[in-house]
C-alpha cells in the first residue's frame, strides 16, 4: 500500500503541472504497476481535486485495485496553481460515487425525480439529494425529498446510529427521506415517509430506488423497489 501511495504521489506532480497525458493506462517506470487517471472520476471541492476509483493494475497478474486520492493545491500569482500535498490516498470504498449518475429520472408512473450532486463531504463520502420536480414529459410534481451519502453504512453520518446498520449490505448507497412523498392516491412514491431509510444503486441508465423502512421499523432488504429511467435533458 505504501508503494502505491508513493507512485500516486509522483504522478500528482504531473497533475499539478497540468501536463497533457495519454488517455490510456500508463506503466510506471521501474514498477509492475499501471495507473489510469482517465478512467477515474474527478470531483473538485475548494482547492482540492479528488480522484475517485482510479484503477491501479498489476501488469503481471492483471489484478486491478481501485483507489481514491485527494490532491490539495495552493495558488501563487507569479506561478499559478502549485501542488501542496496528497491529503488522502486509500482503496475505494464500496458504493463509490462514481457508480451514481446525477440527472433527471422518471418513475414508471411518469413522476420525475432530480438526482443532484455530488457534494464532497470528506475523502470517502459525498452527498446527493433527490427531489420531485416538474419538467417536460413528467407528470404532476411530487413532494419527494431525500438525501443520500455515499460509502458504507457503518459510520454513515445520517443513518449510522440505526440498529439495522450492521445488517445492511454494500450493494446500496444509503440515505433517508427528508420529507414525505406525495399523498396522491396510487402513487408508487406514496409509501416513502419522512425519516424512512432508503437506498439507491445504478444500473446503466436506470436508477434503482429502495425503501428499507415500513412504519417505524427498518429492514436489511428493501420492502419496496422502484426502477427509474434517466431522461435526456
Image (cartoon, grey):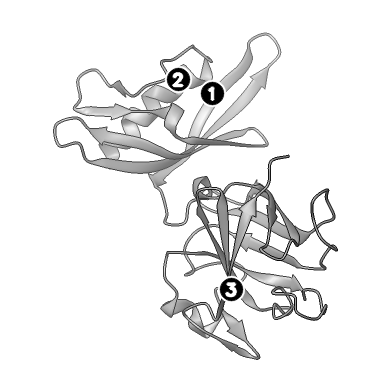
> What x and y, as percent, mark residue 156?
54, 67
> What x and y, as percent, mark residue 153?
49, 68
- Position above or below: 107 against 75: below
Left or right? Give the position of 146 relative to 5.
right
Quarter holding the C terminus? top right
Which circle, 3 or 2, is nearer the viewer? 3
Of callouts 3 and 1, the N-terminal one? 1
Q: For the residue labelled by badge 1, is the local secondary structure a helix, a strand or a loop?
A: strand
Asked if the residue at tag 1 contacts the one at tag 2, i.e. Cβ–Cβ closer than 8 Å, the answer is yes
Q: Which mark is residue 13?
A: 2
Of callouts 3 and 2, the N-terminal one? 2
Residue at position x 31%, y 35% in the image: 56
Left or right? Give the position of 38 relative to 194.
left
User: What distance separates the C-alpha of mark 3 from that of mark 1?
Assistant: 36 Å
Q: For the residue labelled by badge 2, is the local secondary structure a helix, a strand or a loop?
A: helix
Neighbor class of circle 1 (other Cα within 10 Å; few <14, some 14-19, many 20+) is: some
Q: For the residue labelled by badge 3, is the local secondary structure a helix, a strand or a loop?
A: loop
Quarter holding the N terminus? top left
> What x and y, as percent, mark residue 15?
49, 21
- Position above or below: 84 against 96: above
Find disc 3 in the rendering and name its residue: 159
User: What distance separates the C-alpha of mark 2 from that of mark 1?
Assistant: 7 Å
Image-quadrant location for residue 11: top left
Neighbor class of circle 2 (other Cα within 10 Å; few <14, some 14-19, many 20+) is: some
As drawn, which residue projects farthest toward the bottom? 216
Find disc 1 in the rendering and name its residue: 83
Amino acid at each position: 500500500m505504501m508503494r502505491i501511495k508513493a507512485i500516486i504521489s509522483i504522478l500528482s506532480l504531473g497533475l499539478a503541472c497540468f501536463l497533457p497525458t495519454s488517455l490510456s493506462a500508463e506503466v510506471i517506470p521501474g514498477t509492475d504497476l499501471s495507473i489510469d487517471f482517465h478512467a477515474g472520476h474527478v470531483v473538485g471541492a475548494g482547492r482540492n481535486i479528488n480522484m475517485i476509483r482510479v484503477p491501479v493494475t498489476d501488469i503481471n497478474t492483471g489484478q486491478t485495485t481501485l483507489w481514491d486520492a485527494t490532491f490539495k493545491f495552493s495558488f501563487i500569482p507569479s506561478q499559478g496553481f502549485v501542488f501542496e500535498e496528497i491529503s488522502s490516498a486509500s482503496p475505494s470504498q464500496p458504493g463509490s460515487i462514481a457508480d451514481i449518475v446525477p440527472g433527471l429520472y422518471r418513475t414508471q408512473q411518469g413522476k420525475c425525480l432530480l438526482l443532484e450532486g455530488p457534494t464532497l463531504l470528506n475523502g470517502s463520502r459525498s452527498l446527493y439529494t433527490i427531489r420531485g420536480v416538474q419538467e417536460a414529459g413528467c407528470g404532476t410534481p411530487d413532494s419527494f425529498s431525500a438525501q443520500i451519502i455515499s460509502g458504507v453504512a457503518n459510520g454513515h453520518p445520517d443513518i449510522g446510529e440505526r440498529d439495522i446498520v450492521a445488517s445492511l449490505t454494500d450493494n446500496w448507497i444509503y440515505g433517508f427521506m427528508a420529507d414525505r412523498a406525495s399523498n396522491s392516491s396510487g402513487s408508487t412514491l406514496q409509501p416513502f415517509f419522512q425519516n424512512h431509510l432508503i437506498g439507491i444503486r445504478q444500473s446503466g441508465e436506470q436508477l434503482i430506488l429502495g425503501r428499507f423502512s415500513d412504519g417505524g421499523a427498518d429492514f436489511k432488504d428493501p420492502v419496496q423497489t422502484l426502477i427509474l429511467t434517466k431522461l435526456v435533458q
